[in-house]
Image (cartoon, rainbow, N blue to C red):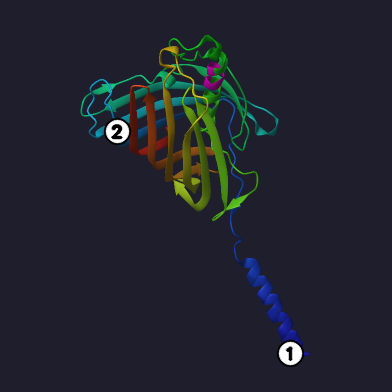
Amino acid sequence: MRKKGIISLLILLIIFMCGCFPKEKSILLQYKYQPGEILKYKFSNISKGIITTEGLPILGTSTSPIEVMIETRCKFTQKVTGIEEGGVANIDFSYDSFEQDIKTPIFSQKQANPFFNLLEGKSLNIKIGKDGSLLKQTGIEEIPGQIPENIQQELIPKFKAEWEKNIVTLIERSYQRFPLEEMKVGDSWIRELSYNIPLLGTTRGKFAYTIEEWTQIKGIECVQVGIEANLTVSEREPFVFPQEIDISKVTFNGAAQGKGKMIFAYQQGRLMSNDLEMDVKMQVNYSQPERELKMNLDFKTQTLLELE
């Protein structure tokens, strides 16, 4: 009996000790917006690389490699106007400023990006789920698209539709889309995005996210998430161009791979930062009956999004 009693006590001790070990931490990643709060973010992208050409030069430009650096900076604001059932947030989303610098051995200048310039100062109304899903957006139709000169009249509605889709994708990329189940260190999820560049091609992206560690940033409880990205760019057939070059044929294809990290304040439910570096390689073929040009682009980019 004494032996059985000792064994029973040992079993109870083991059970007790096992129960005392801390359980592996797991959390549900969610946005937790508060009515009336205003969040301001700054975005920057630096692209450095080389462009080489094969074939006849355009407008007397040398075919030797050209070094190019493009730096884009912008700021945008999220103002929470209300919270609906299920934590869905109503947000006024506005792009406040855009700047772009282009530097080459030939020239250096500040230049307005035609896509971004039309968004500056505009406000959109969106609904965002707690998982970061874009549920509804209004106001996009009030932002005019920049229609290329002499584009065929029958193509204008299609161009505008693609323009609006691209704005939606730009907003979606500003929010991380989180899984609906709790996550712990080592867990992963995948996000895929696809959008069209009007008249040019289709970009498809696959982003893999992995929980790396729990950390503190300025005293705030955060999670660090590793990012692996793979993107492809391919032509969309048939190609359609403005009337004055409708005999041209241009094809695009390329790929990009990169790594980065995201910092998310999981207790406050706020994105703190998103940092991604990528290697980009593109090929552009331009052909007409009298000439053919091939361009190769080899770039490294760094994209940083931070909460101010």
**Which amino acid is tagged 1?**
Lys
Which percent across, then down, holds residue 186? 54, 56
Which percent across, then down, holds residue 68? 28, 32
Q: Is residue 16 visible?
A: yes
Please report the residue visible at 33 percent of the width from the left and 24 percent of the height from the top: 291
Residue hosting label 1: 3
Which is nearer the N-term, disc 2 or disc 1? 1
**What main secondary structure does the magenta stretch of the protein show?**
helix
Label 2 crowding class (10 Å Cα cut-off): few <14, some 14-19, many 20+?
A: few
Depth check, front residue: 101 or 97: 101
Q: Quadrant of residue 150?
A: top left
Residue hosting label 2: 54
Q: Nearer the viewer, mark 2 or mark 1?
A: 2
For the magenta stretch, what is the residue range? Answer: 159-163
Q: Is residue 269 visible?
A: no
Query: Secondary structure under badge 2?
Result: strand
Query: Secondary structure under badge 1?
Result: helix
Q: Is residue 162 found inside the magenta-colored segment of the image? A: yes
The Cα–Cα distance between marks 2 and 1, rounded to whole angstroms, is 88 Å
Depth check, front residue: 44 or 7: 44
31 left or right of 222 in image: right
Quadrant in which the C terminus appears: top left
Please report the residue visible at 53 percent of the width from the left and 30 percent of the height from the top: 195
**Which amino acid is tagged 2?**
Glu
Q: Quadrant of residue 46?
A: top left
Which percent across, then down, holds residue 17? 63, 71
Q: Is residue 109 found inside the magenta-colored segment of the image? A: no
Residue sitting at the far right? 1
Which percent across, then down, holds residue 66? 25, 32
19 relative to 71, above or below = below
